[in-house]
């Protein structure tokens, strides 16, 4: 996939959409997977002054290779600070110093609540045991805004979660605020089909754009509830040739995050 | 030193004799002496400094009924569960990061194969707060962490408490006092003053929370090496019971400045863990079949070690000052 840039893949469109959520100067809590690549792209494009925070205990990471996990040694060398994990959560998250947090999910509902714990309703006898909570509940509660990145299908975009690991907009409306969640809640959901926002009143997930080549029909097919669609419905901005070259040749030449 | 006095160069700082016995033990001795059947054992290290050699020695000594505690159970916990050491897993996130599932753990949780495994789960922050409460001598630790989630429904250690000052309802976790903490580090002196650089994870909290502490290091260094740089000391001798010197004891995880994470081994694990028979063969070959870590290191081979050794990136020295 080197040489002349072909059309962007779904993964590349997702990375670019995630990258655009980063604002210059943001303190970004970087999660597992694609966000690792998205923040590296943001640093090189429009947000050179954003601060990368990793829950492993790193503030101001400047990795010289693509980190393969959130605890990669390349995140430490050249960082501004390394601190105990407990302090990372206490001071950067609970202390209100995180602007943006990225999250992933095995299941998501229309209000952006997430399940990463079990598939199946019987917690004691799960059909599939998922990884669990990790840092997600605290990122979701405390960050000023969060962005969820997930592949989309009917098993993931569900009417009702099997388990709520991480709170989004709770039951919608003002319910999140009523429970005393200090952070700002989910702002966007980015999938391999489209980009979603949340209605300012009902806090229901609303399709804002579909990726190039994706139809609304396909998105509805991959959603387990009656999907709300924004008007007008846009097309997700795709990365241009220069950005694709940056992604493919410099940032992720081994296609660690861009595979598939 | 007398008040107001100033020591001249011909009145040097007196040598303080070392009064304590060395705590340096072999891994076999340390595990045999300090890890008992039924114990609650914390094996920390977030991606960095995962105590593989110690965990594999626990397997080798066939400890049973352990409650294993770790923020992120990964390959090591998969091995320890498969080997039948555990009755319970207390954790925050379980998986082979970026690769897939811990299938031995999943078989135990989903199908009670080869036996049942109790689980008790937290967010990372919640489990960290349990260590912090125990390390600080508090019965619980307050946090904002679980509101709006189903976690308190399945975990009786997650409760709520009312702030006596503001009236706000906060979440709370109980103190976790492990019987043993096993902590890897770059270096320690023979008393157990332990220095870590790079990700420090929950190493200090786990050590202060536990009743017994085994420190496993790449190098045991003279006490004056530690005392030349006290800010780097994460764990003080007073909480440490044993110091084990075993180079590469965190492989296939990494030790900052010593060796990189062996990502190929993490990828290879996915094929091993999916097949119970294959996992069994791995344990026979790489754990039960080896007497100690030195032989493991031989078998790992010079080529792999060379591949994982990073180039240098030195910190500049700092001047602590000489205050005679």
Image (cartoon, coloured by chain):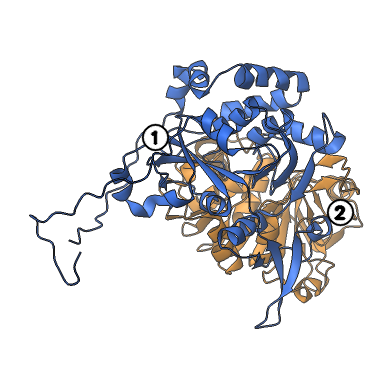
Q: Quadrant of residue B69?
A: top right
Question: Where does the C terminus of chain A fall, quadrant-wise?
Answer: top right
Rendering coords of residue A128 (x, y %):
84, 40
Label 1, residues with CA under 10 Å away: few <14, some 14-19, many ≥20: some
Q: Residue at x 52, y 30 (%)?
A: B29
Task: Say what secondary structure mark 2 lies in.
Answer: loop
Report whether residue A184 is seen. yes
Vertical order, B25 against B126 (above or below): above
The residue beneath circle 2 is A161
Left or right placement of residue B10 versus residue B102 in this view = left
Q: Is residue A101 left or right of residue B232?
A: right
**For this view, does B50 lie left or right of residue B86?**
left
> What chain does badge 1 belong to?
B
Q: Is residue B175 above or below residue B185?
A: below
Q: Is residue A4 visible?
A: no
Give the letter of the blue chain: B
- Chain in orange colour: A
Marks 2 and 1, how far apart in space?
49 Å
Which type of secondary structure does the marked residue at label 1 adopt? strand
In the image, which is nearer the foreground, mark 2 or mark 1? 1
Output the chain of dot 2.
A
Q: Residue at x 58, y 59 (%)?
A: B132
What residue sits right under mark 1 in the picture? B219
How far across and how far down the image is residue B154, in percent? 83, 55
């Amino acid at each position: 996939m080197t040489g002349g840039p072909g059309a962007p893949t779904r993964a590349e469109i997702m990375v670019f959409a995630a990258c655009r959520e980063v604002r210059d100067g943001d303190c970004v809590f970087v999660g597992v997977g694609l966000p690792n690549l998205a923040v590296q792209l943001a640093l090189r494009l429009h947000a050179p002054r954003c601060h990368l925070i990793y829950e492993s205990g790193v503030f101001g990471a400047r990795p010289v290779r693509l980190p393969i996990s959130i605890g990669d040694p390349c995140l430490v060398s050249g960082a501004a600070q390394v601190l105990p994990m407990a302090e990372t959560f206490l001071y950067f998250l609970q202390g209100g110093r995180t602007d943006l947090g990225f999250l992933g999910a095995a299941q998501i509902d229309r209000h952006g609540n997430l399940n990463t714990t079990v598939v199946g309703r019987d917690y004691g006898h799960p059909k599939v045991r998922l990884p669990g909570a990790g840092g997600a509940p605290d990122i979701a509660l405390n960050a000023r805004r969060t962005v969820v990145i997930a592949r989309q299908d009917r098993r993931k975009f569900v009417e009702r979660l099997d388990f709520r690991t991480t709170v989004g907009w709770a039951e919608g409306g003002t319910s999140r605020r009523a429970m005393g969640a200090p952070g700002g809640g989910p702002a966007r959901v980015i999938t391999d089909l489209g980009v979603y926002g949340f209605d300012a009143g009902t806090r229901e997930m609303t399709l804002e754009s579909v990726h190039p080549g994706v139809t609304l029909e396909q998105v509805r097919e991959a959603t387990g509830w009656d999907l709300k669609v924004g008007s007008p419905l846009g097309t997700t901005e795709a990365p241009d040739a220069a950005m694709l070259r940056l992604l493919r040749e410099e940032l992720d030449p081994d296609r660690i995050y861009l595979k598939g | 030193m007398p008040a107001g006095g100033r020591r001249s160069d011909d009145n040097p700082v007196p040598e303080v004799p070392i009064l304590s016995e060395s705590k340096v033990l072999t891994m076999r001795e340390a595990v045999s002496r300090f890890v008992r059947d039924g114990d609650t054992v914390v094996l920390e290290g977030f991606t960095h400094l995962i105590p593989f050699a110690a965990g594999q020695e626990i397997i080798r000594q066939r400890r049973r009924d352990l409650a294993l505690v770790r923020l992120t159970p990964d390959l090591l916990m998969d091995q320890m569960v498969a080997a039948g050491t555990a009755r319970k897993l207390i954790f925050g996130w379980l998986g082979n990061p970026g690769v897939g599932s811990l299938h031995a753990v999943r078989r135990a949780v989903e199908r009670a194969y080869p036996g049942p495994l109790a689980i008790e789960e937290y967010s990372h922050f919640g489990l960290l707060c349990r260590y912090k409460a125990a390390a600080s001598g508090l019965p619980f630790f307050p946090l904002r962490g679980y509101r709006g989630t189903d976690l308190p429904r399945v975990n009786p250690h997650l409760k709520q408490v009312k702030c006596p000052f503001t009236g706000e309802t906060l979440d709370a976790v109980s103190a976790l006092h492990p019987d043993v903490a096993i902590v890897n580090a770059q270096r320690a002196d023979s008393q157990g003053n332990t220095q870590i650089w790079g990700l420090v994870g929950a190493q200090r909290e786990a050590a202060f929370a536990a009743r017994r502490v085994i420190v496993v290091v790449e190098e045991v260094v003279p006490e004056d090496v530690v005392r030349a740089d006290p800010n780097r000391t994460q764990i003080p001798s007073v909480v440490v019971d044993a110091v084990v010197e075993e180079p590469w004891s965190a492989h296939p995880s990494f030790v900052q400045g010593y060796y990189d994470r062996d990502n190929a081994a993490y990828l290879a694990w996915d094929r091993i863990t999916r097949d119970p028979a294959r996992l069994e063969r791995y344990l026979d070959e790489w754990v039960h079949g080896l007497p100690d870590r030195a032989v493991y290191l031989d078998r790992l081979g010079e080529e792999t070690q060379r591949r994982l050794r990073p180039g240098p990136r030195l910190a500049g020295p700092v001047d602590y000052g000489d205050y005679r």
